[in-house]
Image (cartoon, rainbow, N blue to C red):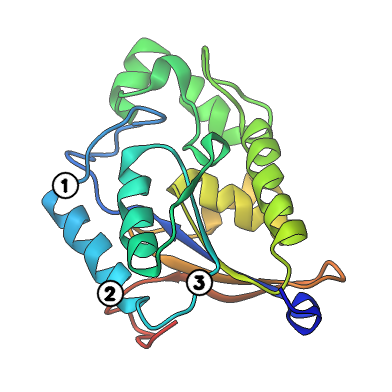
Amino acid sequence: MSDKKALEPTRILLLRHGHVENPEARFYSQQDVPLSEKGVKQSQEVARLLEPLSLDAVFSSDLSRSLYLARLISEPRGLSPVVRQELREVDFGSWSGLTWKEIEELYPGQFLKRMQDLQGFRPPNGENLKEVQRRTAKVIEEIALKMRGATVAVVAHGGTNRVIVSHLLSLPIQKCFSIGQDYCCINEILLFQDGNVVIERLNWKIGGPAAGSP
């Protein structure tokens, strides 16, 4: 990497995986659920959109719904995704695979308690969002340090992406659900060496109101 490039900001394209089978507001958590036919198509469309863009590296959650998109982006460039378990979705523990209704039936009042304390509340055998922030921030900080001036893609999940963006903007975790993260959305983030962060795109979607190439 040239000295000139090292002085430039690190550009991160933070993506969410595609639509999954039978989502129905179910907390899939860290279960390795497959993409739906729609999700496969979304992933292929995003990969085609990014074809003209030069990327220095691609990082991904190890769950297959994210890895599928990461591989589509990586392979035409002769890259292999850097797989990081820390980028997995939020671990909902015993709530994994359940719907909101099922959680309320099995754990009355607990979902509301979680929403009132996202930072501290931990589902049975799961994790709270402070812990998610800690593990995801580790990856982003490594990218900022080791990939100075580079352009990288990071493919993860709705919950982890919200926590990452909140962390980078120093927003309270409690506000993270104010950040939209649709399936196969693109967030474009600049990390400057002085610690400043610029969000150039947030929850951008193909065919959305701000259509255009990233």
Q: Is residue 67 visible?
A: yes
Q: Residue at x 46, y 18 (%)?
A: 93
Q: Quadrant of residue 113?
A: top right
Mark 3 and mark 1 in contact? Answer it, CB < 8 Å: no
Q: Which mark is residue 55?
A: 3
List the single residue furthest toward the left: 37
Label disc, if present, on residue 48 of the rendered structure = 2
Kindly state the secondary structure of the residue where label 2 is placed. helix
- SS of the residue at dot 3? loop
Horizontal and vertical percent for residue 103? Answer: 36, 20
Earlier residue among tags 2 and 3? 2
Location of mark 1 (residue): 36
Residue 105 in the image: state x and y as whole percent.
Answer: 32, 15
Q: Amino acid at mark 3?
A: Leu
Q: Is residue 108 visible?
A: no
Please, what is the three-letter code of the amino acid marked with disc 2? Arg
In front: 186, or 74? 74
Which residue corresponds to the image point at 37% horizontal and 22% vertical from the top-left? 96
Near mark 2 (Cα within 10 A), the count class, few <14, some 14-19 or many ≥20, is: few
Amino acid type at mark 1 = Ser
Figure check: 133 above or below 165: above
Q: Which comes sooner in the sequence, label 3 or label 1?
A: 1
